[in-house]
Each structure stands twice: as structure tokens, then as C-alpha cells.
Image: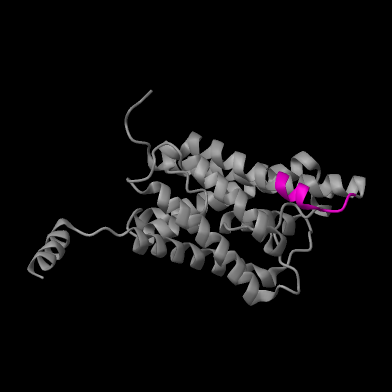
Amino acid sequence: MNDSPPSTLQKLLAELVGTAFLVYVGAGSAAATGVIAAGTRVPFSMAQLGVISFAFMLVIVGTVYAIGHISGAHINPAVTVALAATGRFPWREVPGYVLAQVAGAVAGALGIFVTLGADAARAAGGGVTAYAAQVGFARGTLIEGIGTFMLVFVIFGVLDRRAVPGWAPMAIGSIVFAIIIIVGPATGAAINPARYAGPFLVDAAFGGGVAWEQFPAYLIGELAGGLLGAAAYAALAATRTKAQVKSTAAVGTAS
């Protein structure tokens, strides 16, 4: 293997492929569940939600292990922006990463339609997330913000050099599983602007009845939630410098 660092193109392709995997398996499992439910007339239950959550968990674990050493496996614009905002990722690379992630999400969504068939996939929603009318714009934005806050908070935690090494993929996949269980019934738990946009755009292209008025709620909630999650972890995990520790000790001695 070549030990030289990955090129920008390799990083972008890794983000594209990784996000395609995420959408194809994760959002695809939601669409496949809809196809099966339509054929069997079985009402949606916690069992189906658990299967979808588990599919997301597994594909995230596998993908982070596979491309984490290449691109960092952001596979989520909210994560990329949060990392850049906290100085952990260069802003100049953000546009390329986000475009690669959205392109990957579109590719993954197209894969859902190819696999399930356009008619069946469209009838099952194509993996598109949406909130019900009773949820509303403000609440939908808040819910997606909460879910993304939790996700980014955990990601920043496992990136901390003090964290237990080697468990990042499992920790990230597990928190996504948990978030979908509670947030899924309310908004579909996109918690990822690319995961939301990819199926949304493809379903719209195939004539699906997408809710354009909901688009801003997901993007605003997820990006804001990611930034707040990053800020919260930074504040919680901040450590004092040696000078501050010595200063505190000196005050204690003097008293």
C-alpha cells in the first residue's frame, strides 16, 4: 500500500462513495420496508423502524471503517461544516466535500430506484423523509436540530484524543440507531442534509410528490444542530492549560 496521504480527488471520491452507501442501504431500507408493507398490508410498527435503524447503523459502521482513513468519513454536510467551524477541517475543502456528499446521496437514491423499480420506489416514498402536517415547520426544524446535535456531539467525542481508541465507527453507528428510534416517527430522522437532499431530488425527478416547503426546515435544523453539538462538546470537554492549573493551585495554597 502507498503510505502517501490521499489526494483531494481520493478524498472527494471517498465521500461520494460513502454517502452513496449510506443512502442506498439506509434510505433504501426505508423504501424497501414501504414496498414490502404495501404488498403485505402490514401496518408500520416499531419492528420495521428497528430494522431501518439497524440498517443505518450497519452501513455507517462499515463505511466509517472503510473510508475513515481516506477522507475522515464525514458523509454528512452538517459534520463537515461543524468540523470546519471549530477549526478541525479547512474551510477551503468544505464546498468540495459537500458537493461530493450530495452527489453521492443522489447516486445512492438512484440506486434505490434501480433496485426496487421506479414505480415501487416512488410509491414507497423513495427513502424521502418528511414530517407530518401536525408536526409543522418550527417543530420539524427543532426535532432535526436535536437529532443532529446528538450525532455531532458524539462524533466530536470519539474524535477527542482522550477517547477510547478504535470504537468510533460503532459509537457513531449506535447513536444514529438510537436517534432514528425516537426522531424517526416525527421527521424521518434525516439528521444529514445530503441524506435528505439526495432521495428528495431523485424522487422529485421521477415525479414523486415531494414537499418543497419542508426543504428549508431540514437544512436549517441539521446545520444549526450540528454547529450547536460541536460547540457544546467543545465547551464541555475544554481542558485547562498547565498555567491555569498552577494558578489555581497557587490560589489554594495562599488561602
Quarter of the figure with residue 164: top left
Quarter of the figure with residue 125: bottom right
> In the image, 4: left or right of 68?
left
- In the rendered image, the residue lying farthest to the front is 255
The residue drawn where x is 47% and y is 48% is: 74
The residue drawn where x is 89% and y is 49% is: 42
Q: Position of residue 230 (x, y in %)?
A: 42, 61
> In the image, 167: left or right of 185?
left
Q: Which residues are magenta?
A: 42-51
**On-image quarter of the C terminus:** bottom left
Q: Is residue 110 above or below residue 217?
A: above
Q: Is residue 33 above or below residue 233?
A: above
Color scheme of the displayed model: one colour
Q: Position of residue 199 (x, y in %)?
A: 68, 54
Pick the residue in front: 178 or 248: 248
Pick the residue in front: 99 or 27: 27
Query: Magenta-highlighted stretch: main secondary structure?
Result: helix
Q: Position of residue 107 (x, y in %)?
A: 63, 45
Pick the residue in front: 187 or 244: 244
Quarter of the figure with residue 82: bottom left
User: Is residue 201 visible from the viewing direction of this image?
Assistant: no
Pick the residue in front: 21 or 162: 162
Q: How many marks?
A: 0
Q: Is residue 11 magenta?
A: no
The residue drawn where x is 49% and y is 68% is: 224
**On-image quarter of the N terminus:** top left
- In the rendered image, the residue lying farthest to the top is 1
> In the image, 34: left or right of 76?
right
